[in-house]
Image (spheres, rainbow, N blue to C red):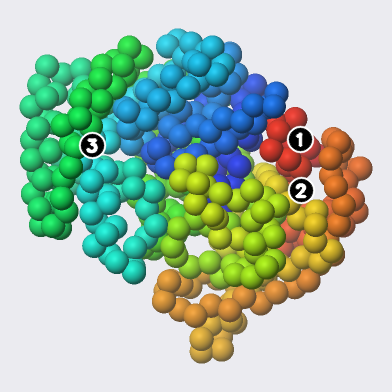
Amino acid sequence: MVDILLGLQWGDEGKGKIVDVLAPNYKVVARFQGGPNAGHTLEFDGIKHVLHQIPSGVFRKDCDNIIGNGVVLDPVIFKKEIDSLTEKFKMDLSQNLIISTKASIIIPTHRLLDAAQEKAKGVNKIGSTLKGIGPTYTDKVGRHGLRVGDILSPTFKEKYNKLVAKHKQQLSFLEFEIEGLEETEKVFFEACEFLKTFKITETEYTVNKHLEDGEKVLAEGAQGSLLDIDFGSYPFVTSSSTTASGVCAGLGVAPGKIGEVYGIFKAYCTRVGSGPFPTELEDATGELMRKEGNEFGATTGRPRRCGWLDIPALKYTVMLNGVTQLVMMKADVLNIFKELEVCVAYKLADGTVTEQMPFDICDEKVTPIYETVKGWDCSLEGITDFDKLPQELKDYVKYIEDKVGVSITYVSTSPDRTATIKR
């Protein structure tokens, strides 16, 4: 079976850590969507590392890692990631990292288009990471993009130049000046040659062969469900399907092969970039939460917006993904609070109270309706048994379970891989 692990909020939930924790139970960890904006942070043995495109199972020696067809891959960032892993951990990933021929390639002008389009939006900018991900997905859907398999073709340069010519026309229309492209292209083609040293194949066959052999596969999502291109807070979303439905298209597996769905959420909420955030705290409490949780983007370094847990949003993404198990991250960040606020419904501008996500949430004035629960106001350091957690934290877990209707099976109490309590 293919089990799925994905984020239920606006990304940055701590998915990388949990993939690393669960990986020993799986033969394969596979990324099914997203690009290099996905900063999955792992911390163990006193060492912190951030992965952007490479699956988080790479730190487990017996685990095969697949970059699926639904991913958009930047060869330059890929090479930097591999070089960093080799330098830090003396890892050789040539044998257990496999890349889909059908994964889309981010080329240098995609980044320029990303910057130009964001600049053109002015005050309505989305808050893109400017990694070229959106324009790459646009080219994929428009049927004129490049894919990893193309770099093996003798006509790759010809295909590349044709796409660049198209991009230059778009950049000219947006009145965006092109600088340093020649040097950037040199680095890009060197990275493509490096990419060729890895196993590039039709990974849909690889994944399904593992399943036929009775081996378990863990599908790893990037970003979060509230950033899904269809169901997120559009247009302040990413350009791919971040929900469980994206696994079938992003890896080439049938719906009937899906097993467990692990939904990851923080004990509070964060968001990077623009867009609606009903429970955002733009005050001293939000700043305190940000400092305590070290809430700065793993890829961009941007301060994350912080706020209380949003139950209607969580119930929404649990429903969309068919979540079977919940994983609560960063419970330790709330150690400092004697009381916690939890959003249980929204009040709309016309006075209507609802527990559903409004279609026009980006335009609608949404006021959260809160319930207050007790905090635990103490350290969780050294606790490895759920029963030994403070009663207030156990009550908080039960409170969320009752509201959402799904069991919380893991609770994370610090960034280290060992600080993950299984119930």
Of labels 1 and 3, earlier in sequence is 3
Whole-angstrom CA distance, mark 2 to mark 1, is 10 Å
Q: Are marks 1 and 3 in contact (CB under 8 Å)?
A: no
Whole-angstrom CA distance, mark 1 to mark 3, is 40 Å
Q: Quadrant of the C terminus?
A: top right
Please tell me which residue is depicted at 64% across the width and 56% down the height of the picture. 290
Q: Is residue 403 above or below residue 321?
A: below
- Secondary structure at numbered mark 2: helix
Q: Name the image quarter holding residue 5.
A: top right
Q: Is residue 83 above or below residue 181?
A: above
| Amino acid at dot 3 | Pro
Q: Which residue is mark 1?
A: 419
Q: Which residue is mark 3?
A: 108
Left or right of residue 330, residue 42 in this image: left
| Amino acid at dot 1 | Ala
Whole-angstrom CA distance, mark 3 to mark 2, is 41 Å
Q: Position of residue 203 (x, y in %)?
A: 37, 23
Q: Position of residue 121 (x, y in %)?
A: 28, 64
Asked whether residue 319 appears in the rendered view, the answer is: no
Q: Are marks 2 and 1 in contact (CB under 8 Å)?
A: yes
In the orientation shown, which residue stands out farthest toward the bottom? 350
- Could you classify mark 2 by the number of other residues whose Cα lies within 10 Å: few (under 14), some (14-19), or many (20 or more)? many
| Amino acid at dot 2 | Asp
Please tell me which residue is depicted at 33% across the width and 12% down the height of the picture. 197
Q: Which residue is mark 2?
A: 332
